[in-house]
Image: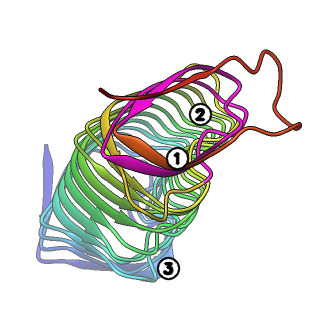
Amino acid sequence: MKIIQDSVFGGERPLYGEKHLFLERVIIEPGESALKETTDIEAVNCEFQGKYPFWECDGFTVRDCIFREGARAALWYSKNCVMADTLIEAPKMFREIENVSLENVRIPNAQETFWNCRGIKLRNVEVQKGDYIYMGCSDIDIDGYRQQGNYSFQYTRRVTIRNAYLDTKDAFWQTEDVTVYDSEIHGEYLGWYSRRLRLVRCHISGTQPLCYCDDLVLEDCTFAPDADLAFEYSSVQADIRGRVTSVKNPRTGKIVSDGYNDIILDSNIKSPGDCQILTRV
């Protein structure tokens, strides 16, 4: 393996097409596509300042590195990425990536990050300003996660999330086969138009959650007082601990809780309109 240490590169494509390369304490200054179309790259204690550093790459490991704000759109159209103990200040990271694993990574400016990626594994990751994060991604496995940013996980498929804190409006819209365990989800209009969304031991807040859902399942969940007008036009099986502020026109299924402040069943309810709304004895 070729080794480059304590060096500075800038301009356009300075390391284009390299194979089997180890970088340590290397700075990539402003420029474009520093490591485009590379194979088997490892970067340790490096700083990336220029945009598009990793495009069309196969097999790269990044540890103890920093991606500055100028390194926007850094990892696109690539596969087999492992990243650990890294700070990402750049937006629009990770597009069209296949097989990406992050551990102990902070992304304080995660706007439009993770689009159309397949095979995402996150452990102990923190995200801020993550508007539209994970758009159109599939096969996601997350554990130990904190996120602030709206419109997240839209159009995702086959997602498992554990031990997360999500501050996100309009999360999980039009998803398929998403399961969330032991997490807090704060934000309006949660999970609309989802299919087979399952929430287990989760705390939910924000108005009008879980409407227009197909095959929605809640197990041992709790609702905040502002989680009102829930389940409109949804097919649902829900076991809720504590009281629910209000339920409106669920389409079918069964809802059980410790009580309801209001149950709204009006002329706008959709067929079959036979959902059982029960109070736990």
Pick whichever, 125 or 99, lies toward us. Answer: 125
- Quick check: is 232 in the magenta stretch? yes
Amino acid residing under circle 1: Phe
Q: Distance of mark 3 from mark 2, alpha carbons?
A: 38 Å
Residue drawn at point x = 55 percent, y = 36 percent: 156
- Quick check: is 203 in the magenta stretch? no
Amino acid residing under circle 2: Thr
Residue drawn at point x = 53 percent, y = 54 percent: 152
- Mark 1 neighbour density, 10 Å: few (under 14) some (14–19) many (20 or more): many
Which quadrant holds residue 277?
A: top right
Identify the magenta region: 229-257
Secondary structure type for disc 2: loop
Quadrant (top left/top right/bottom left/bottom right) for the N terminus: top left
Picture layout, residue 25 above or below residue 165: below
Pick whichever, 155 or 91, lies toward us. Answer: 155
Quadrant (top left/top right/bottom left/bottom right) for the C terminus: top left
Q: Distance of mark 2 from mark 1, alpha carbons?
A: 8 Å
Q: Which mark is residue 153?
A: 1
Picture layout, residue 162 above or below residue 7: above
Which residue position is annotated with label 2? 175
Which residue position is annotated with label 3? 31
Picture layout, residue 47 above or below residue 264: below
Q: Residue furthest front?
A: 281
Q: What secondary structure is the magenta-colored segment mainly?
A: strand
Asked if the residues shown at circle 2 and circle 1 are in contact, with their CB atoms under 8 angstroms apart, the answer is: yes
Q: Is residue 116 left or right of residue 42?
A: right
